[in-house]
Amino acid sequence: MNQQEILNTIALTRINYFTLTGLLQLYRTLGSATSVIEHRNDIKDILPDASPRLIRALQNLDEPMKRAEVELNYDLHHDIQPLCLIDEHYPQRFKDCPDAPLILFYKGNADLNQKRIINMVGTRKCTLYGEDVIRNFLHDLRQLCPKVLVVSGLAYGVDINSHRQALQNGYDTVGVLAHGLDNLYPRQHLSTAREMIRQGGLLTEFLTMTNADKINFVRRNRIVAGISDACILVESAAKGGGLITTEIAQGYGRDVFAFPGRIGDEYSAGCNHLIRDNGASLITSANDFVKAMGWEEDRELVQAQQQGIERQLFPDLSAEEQAIVKVLSKKNDLQINIISIQANIPIAKLTGMLFQLEIKGVIKSLAGGMYHLLK
């Protein structure tokens, strides 16, 4: 992404707090911030419904451009990556949401577009029960799905416990902030945040010198929801920020889950009510979650990798068995007749050999007479 496009995008963020919908529509129509600025004098021709306020705001970009230059200079000197909406590294799950920010600021090394991303949210007054739920869930999930990015908001309670347990279990974890990357709130989580930058990252839509105002936390919640596949509510009172995030996640079409708690417990009320009202699916374990998400293939991959290690320890395949493996390694999931032709082994003989390879943990049979190489 060239620096001028980044500067132009940052400048547009200075006017988007009251014109986000129209500005985002204009940006998507023209394809870049640079094009928006180039066409700022004929906006009505491009977007007939553009508000007078948006048109006026685009006429005077001198101050926004100066602020953009300050911001980009800070980013370049502090290893912060500005991710414009059209950048391939921008979280693609969030890109098409109706209130996606034009730019995000990211400090870290985790892939924001990796295959599996979850968020864990809830009360800032996490109980011992909630801590146990988080600890057990992430420990067990790691055994079932080795590569998952865990997202939360770096706040007290459920957030910080989720980040710390993710780190402890070898997961990358990203904290979404309600302020700029020149500061950290709360300061008590600074050491964890530093560790996250090495094993995950910090993400925000806010420029530097932005305070952690109350409204910013609500805006932050939509990013937590939008960049994830699933939202998991751990503990919540009858009202709280975690419930706001679940509602946003539902609006984005994300899967929402909640852990139930004991009737009458203050910080289980939100979860129990959400489950009762069909706002979330009930889960009690990582296994429940993996089944609900259809992520069993990750578990199969773990088993296959373990079996692969065993195969290396006992390399007892015959020449014909190795020929079968070679065929499947080139193009996996083949029917027996195709394997027979490509390996040059008669079907009558091949049937028994495939059975032996299953016993050895080299392949597995699939529906429709297909065979899959475990690797």
Image: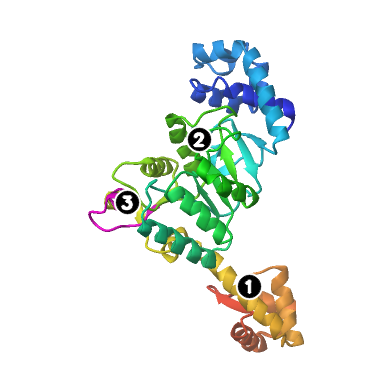
Q: Which residues are drawn in magenta?
A: 257-271
Q: Residue at x 50, y 23 (%)?
A: 17
Element under label 2?
A: loop
User: How many numbered marks, from 0 up?
Assistant: 3
Judge by depth and name the residue closer to the eye, 88 or 62. Answer: 62
Residue 70 falls left or right of residue 236: right
- The amino acid type of the residue labelled 3 equals Cys
Judge by depth and name the residue closer to the eye, 102 or 236. Answer: 236
Identify the residue position indicated by label 2 in the image. Answer: 178
Image quadrant assignment for residue 260: bottom left
Q: Label 3, label 2: how many angstroms apart (C-alpha)?
A: 24 Å
Going by the picture, which residue comes out furthest to the right? Answer: 319
- Mark 1 / mark 3, whichever is N-terminal: 3
Q: Residue at x 63, y 49 (%)?
A: 111
Q: Label 1, label 3: how many angstroms apart (C-alpha)?
A: 36 Å
Judge by depth and name the residue closer to the eye, 270 or 191. Answer: 191
Element under label 3?
A: helix
Q: Label 1, label 2: how many angstroms apart (C-alpha)?
A: 40 Å
One can see residue 198 in this view:
yes
Q: In the rendering, which numbered label is found on residue 305? A: 1
Identify the residue position indicated by label 3 in the image. Answer: 271
The N terminus sits in image quarter: top right
Confirm or deny contact between disc 3 and disc 2 (CB under 8 A).
no
Is 269 covered by the magenta stretch?
Answer: yes
Mark 2 neighbour density, 10 Å: few (under 14) some (14–19) many (20 or more): many
Confirm or deny contact between disc 1 and disc 2 (CB under 8 A).
no
Residue 317 spot, x, y in % from top left: 72, 86
Judge by depth and name the residue closer to the eye, 60 or 252. Answer: 60
